[in-house]
Image (spheres, grey):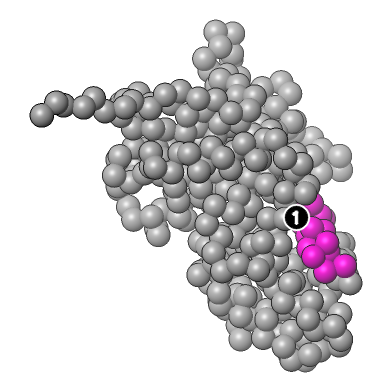
């Protein structure tokens, strides 16, 4: 369930129930984001106690990417036994500003900015 | 048969549109402009140039905000992140909505002024899409940004299409504190073609 591209990578580690997103997400629309959304939804569908979305090395996220993460977060709402943790970094200032909006879609989402 | 005269597009402004600084006689500031031909390479390959151009503008800009201390570094990172996001979104929109049959180029310009950095993206637009776009703009300018942002985020999360989702503009307003304005005008090269210039202004 890995996606390797010149500009971005998505890696799912089943052992730690962590999805690692790296690089720059500047894909064009819903269709191009479908494989990434699939990794995310498949990860939550394994019902882990905690699912970590590690975005600390995600330098850039365009508006289609914001929509994609919103779709994932909304999907995760129905898995009430899974705690979703979103990890961000102060290194990329957009993360502090934009990631907290997802918490409003899923109040139990734990946001950790380091 | 009587020949009916074609209606020419008219100029219309939305929001606090400030004309480009270069049009002011006393302006001596930094500015950059990049132009994109709509026909030289396919849009799929062209898409990559959005990110390249946006990052270039952002990297270029921060050289005018020097400093080695923590506060300066934070300011640089913040500005770079905002300009890169705004420029990329404006270009993505221009690539998506530019009226290909008009053969009109797309341009992005950045002006650095004492208190703000302004970005201007100009593209042609399908005359049939103008009314719907102007309605979207009216909502962006008159409704509460936070409410609209959350409504739209929820709507997009539930929908398969993101057509006209405005998330790019809403993120500029909501997360990056940008001021947005638009100018619709006939193209200088072909007065039958409608162009739209989107202005995004960020305080520095």
Q: Is B148 left or right of B132, judged from the image as shown?
A: right
Instruction: Give yes or no for residue A99 being in the magenta stretch.
Output: yes
- The percent coordinates of residue A46 (x first, y second) are 74, 91
* Residue displayed at 75% across by 55% down: B150
Task: Determine the residue located farthest toward the top in the rendered image.
Answer: B25
The residue tagged 1 is: B150
- Determine the image quadrant of residue A45: bottom right
Compared across the picture, whether A58 is left or right of A25 comes to right
- Residue drawn where x is 39% and y is 58% of the image: B45
Q: Position of residue B138 (x, y in %)?
A: 62, 36
B127 vs B54, nearest the viewer: B127
Above-or-below relation of B28 to A11: above
Above or below for A108 versus B44: below
Q: Residue at x 71, y 62 (%)?
A: B154
> Residue lying furthest left in this view?
B1
Q: Secondary structure at mark 1?
A: helix
How many labels sit on residues? Answer: 1
Badge 1: chain ID: B
The image shows residue A98 at horizontal and vertical percentages of: 76, 55
Placement of B3 over or under B70, stated as above or below: above
The answer, for residue B30, to whether it is visible in the render is: no
Range shown magenta: A87-107
């Amino acid at each position: 369930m890995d996606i390797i591209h010149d500009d971005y990578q998505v890696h799912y580690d089943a052992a730690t129930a962590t999805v690692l997103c790296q690089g720059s997400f500047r894909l064009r629309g819903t269709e191009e984001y479908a494989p990434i959304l699939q990794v995310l939804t498949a990860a939550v569908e394994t019902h882990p106690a905690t699912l970590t979305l590690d975005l600390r090395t995600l330098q850039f996220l365009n508006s289609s990417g914001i929509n994609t993460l919103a779709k994932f977060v909304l999907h995760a709402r129905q898995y009430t036994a899974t705690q979703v943790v979103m990890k961000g970094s102060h290194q990329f200032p957009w993360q502090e500003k934009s990631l907290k909006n997802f918490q409003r879609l899923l109040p139990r989402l734990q946001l950790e900015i380091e | 048969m009587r020949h009916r005269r074609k209606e020419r597009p008219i100029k219309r402004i939305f929001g606090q549109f400030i004309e480009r600084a270069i049009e002011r006689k006393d302006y001596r500031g930094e500015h950059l402009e990049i132009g994109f031909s709509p026909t030289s390479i396919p849009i799929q390959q062209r898409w990559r140039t959005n990110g390249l151009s946006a990052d270039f503008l952002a990297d270029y800009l921060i050289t005018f905000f020097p400093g080695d201390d923590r506060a300066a570094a934070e300011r640089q990172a913040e500005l770079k992140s905002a300009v890169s996001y705004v420029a990329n979104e404006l270009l993505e929109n221009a690539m998506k909505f530019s009226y290909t049959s008009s053969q009109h180029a797309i341009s992005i310009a950045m002006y650095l002024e004492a208190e703000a950095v302004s970005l201007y993206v100009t593209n042609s637009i399908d005359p049939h899409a103008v009314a719907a776009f102007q309605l979207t703009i009216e909502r962006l300018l008159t409704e509460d940004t936070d409410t609209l942002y959350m409504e739209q985020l929820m709507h997009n999360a539930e929908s398969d299409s993101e057509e006209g989702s405005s998330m790019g503009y809403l993120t500029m307003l909501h997360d990056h504190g940008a001021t947005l304005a638009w100018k619709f005008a006939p193209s200088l090269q072909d007065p039958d073609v409608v162009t739209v210039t989107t202005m995004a202004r960020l305080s520095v």
